[in-house]
């Protein structure tokens, strides 16, 4: 129901892009057809090594906030309107990475030709992972989780630092062959006040909450990275189509300034959020270890926290949007009288 409402209300999806998406759907469209189409579209047009749909001017111009120099040149060559940056190129963005969720990237280490000598200290134990585990993703994930708990033990800070540097280097290598699109980010300024607990410790539970990451399992290790808009390249306002089949998303209202991007749903309800964080997407970029250092070497393991029920989260976010922009959100829903997402029970 959340996905259907998001697709119905997402004004950010242009008619041209809607037509592109329709090629992935059967007509008339059933609920199952919609889910399959969103999955297929996401794999073919968003999670692609080449230009994903969200950077294309002809179908997503209304969501482009600033562009990479090469893209701007390409737009000019094709007589399209050039992008006027709405964000300063020195503005710092911030993303978080789930180190436990890199199972496929770690798997590339099984090819000895892809290994670097300087990785041996960090990945040597992974090189010996039982090959039969690869056939069972649940057992493989359990092995990876236990391995990371050992490698990121707080008792050896130097090893932790080397390990994070090796993981980022690995991701940079994997990116050149298989990009993982898109990158979701907020601003460092918006993130910093909630980055640490009251006693100054990294607070990964709060990171997951403010970034709207409702499907992340507990007990995972996260790092934070910061970098400039200029390094990110083409930055865009996200739409539901850019998130795939992901219900922990809520389209920003028409009143939201383009430079604010979207707004992630804060998953914490006690207390509820008082401010909205900006939300942007861009292509996967290379991350030197300096991006981690610039974020304060933030690294932490989530607890057993679980998000509350989705309807309560959506309604709290809807109320915050309404309060912030002084306009009722989704009042035009044609199914408002029966829709538990957009209207009343």
Image (cartoon, rainbow, N blue to C red):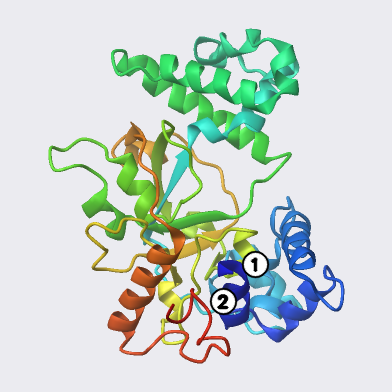
Q: Earlier in the sequence, mark 1 or mark 2?
A: 2
Which quadrant holds residue 19? bottom right
Q: Position of residue 327 (x, y in %)?
A: 36, 90
**Marking on residue 241:** 1
Foreground of the two, 235 or 339: 339
Q: Which residue is mark 2?
A: 63
Q: Position of residue 86 (x, y in %)?
A: 44, 76
* 98 w.r.t. 285: above or below: above
Q: Secondary structure at mark 2?
A: helix
Q: Position of residue 74 (x, y in %)?
A: 71, 71
Foreground of the two, 61 or 268: 268
Which quadrant holds residue 106? top right
Q: Residue at x 40, y 73 (%)?
A: 260
Foreground of the two, 225 or 1: 1
Foreground of the two, 9 or 66: 9
* 20 w.r.t. 273: above or below: below
């Amino acid at each position: 129901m959340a996905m259907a409402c998001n697709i119905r209300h997402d004004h950010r999806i242009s008619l041209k892009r809607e037509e592109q998406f329709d090629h992935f759907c059967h007509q008339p469209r059933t609920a199952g057809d919609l889910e399959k189409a969103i999955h297929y579209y996401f794999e073919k047009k968003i999670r692609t090594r080449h230009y994903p749909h969200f950077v294309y001017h002809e179908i997503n111009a209304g969501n482009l906030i600033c562009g990479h120099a090469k893209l701007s040149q390409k737009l000019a060559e094709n007589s399209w309107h050039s992008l006027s940056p709405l964000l300063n190129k020195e503005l710092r963005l911030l993303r978080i990475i789930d180190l436990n969720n890199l199972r496929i990237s770690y798997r590339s280490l099984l090819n000895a030709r892809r290994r670097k000598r300087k990785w041996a200290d960090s990945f040597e134990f992974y090189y010996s992972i039982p090959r039969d585990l690869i056939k069972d993703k649940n057992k493989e994930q359990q092995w990876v989780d236990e391995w990371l708990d050992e490698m990121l033990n707080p008792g050896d800070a130097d090893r932790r630092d080397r390990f994070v540097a090796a993981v980022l280097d690995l991701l940079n290598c994997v990116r050149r062959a298989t990009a993982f699109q898109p990158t979701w980010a907020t601003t460092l300024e918006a993130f910093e006040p909630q980055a640490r607990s009251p006693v100054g410790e990294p607070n990964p539970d709060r990171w997951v909450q403010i970034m709207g990451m409702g499907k992340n399992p507990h007990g995972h290790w996260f790092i934070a990275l910061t970098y400039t808009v200029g390094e990110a390249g083409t930055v865009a306002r996200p739409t539901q189509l850019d998130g795939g089949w992901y219900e922990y998303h809520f389209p920003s209202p028409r009143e939201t300034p383009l430079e604010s991007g979207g707004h992630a749903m804060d998953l914490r309800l006690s207390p509820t959020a008082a401010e909205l964080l900006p939300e942007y997407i861009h292509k996967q970029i290379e991350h030197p270890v300096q991006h981690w250092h610039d974020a304060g070497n933030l690294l932490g393991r989530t607890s057993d926290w679980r998000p509350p029920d989705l309807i309560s989260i959506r309604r709290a976010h809807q109320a915050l949007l309404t309060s912030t922009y002084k306009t009722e959100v989704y009042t035009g829903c044609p199914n408002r009288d029966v829709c538990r997402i957009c209207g009343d029970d």
